[in-house]
Image: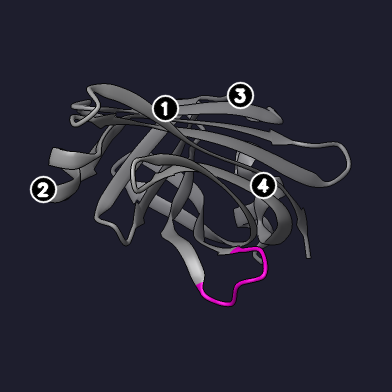
Amino acid sequence: MSEEIIANLGPLAPLAGTWESDKGVDTSRVHSKETITKFREKIVFEPLGPVNNGPQALYGLRYSTTCWRLGEADAFHEELGYWLWDKDREQVMRCFMVPRGVLINAGGTVKANSKDFHLEAELGSQTYGVLSNRYLDDSYKTKRYTLDVSINDDGSFTYSENTQLWIPVNQEIFHHTDENTLTKV
């Protein structure tokens, strides 16, 4: 890893590397029933940058996440994307897609030395927003996404995410949540 890139990652710097855990909890809806799934997870964060947009210089982490139900060999969830740091605007962004046809660009204001941060994306936002394929837009519309991250003193990191889905059949918002604490390997 380039020391220059790591030095410019701000609050994302501690995340560079490979992380694993078997303590994940996913609360989702399967066949109209709330289901809790315990899972193991691997996240790989690879430093990159600078990415220049005119005068804006972003540094970040290219990442991939894979999750497996405990005791199963086949993954049930994957995502690819970027975590980005805009030092001048004190913005952390997480831009990612899942192979169900959902794209999320979440962001929030974060100080450079912060160990805790909160990111959000909202359907219809021109900046930090959500896009879905037509089927999901009609049946499980993602209205809002939030993510809380804590970089812990013991060298682990914890996340809690909430994907708020509008389900027209039930005329309700369902909170699809995921949480985990991972350690660097």
Asked which quadrant contains residue 54, the reply is: top left
Q: Quadrant of residue 111?
A: top right
Residue tagged 2? 134
| Sequence order check, earlier mark of 3 and 4 | 4
Q: How is the image coloured?
A: one colour
Residue kind at label 2, given as amino acid type = Arg
Q: Secondary structure at mark 1?
A: strand
Quarter of the image for the C terminus: give it: bottom right
Seen at 47% across and 44% down, the residue is: 84
**Which disc number belongs to residue 13?**
4
Q: Disc 4 marks which amino acid? A: Ala
Magenta stretch contains residue 70: yes
Q: Which residue is mark 3?
A: 111
Please provide the residue range marked out in magenta: 69-74
Q: Which quarter of the picture shows residue 150?
A: top right
Residue on which the image places disc 1: 120
Question: Taking 116 as reference, is 71 above or below it?
Answer: below
Q: Residue at x 33, y 24 (%)?
A: 173
Q: Secondary structure at mark 2?
A: helix
Sequence-wise, which precedes: disc 1 or disc 4?
4
Considering only vertical position in the picture, is 75 above or below 164?
Answer: below
Pick the residue in front: 79 or 113: 79
For residue 72, above or below residue 14: below
In the rendered image, is residue 8 in sight?
A: no
| Separation of residues labelled 3 and 4 (CA atoms) | 13 Å
Rendered residue at 29%/22% (across/down): 172
Residue 85, numbered label: none
Query: Whole-percent x and y of residue 152?
Result: 80, 37
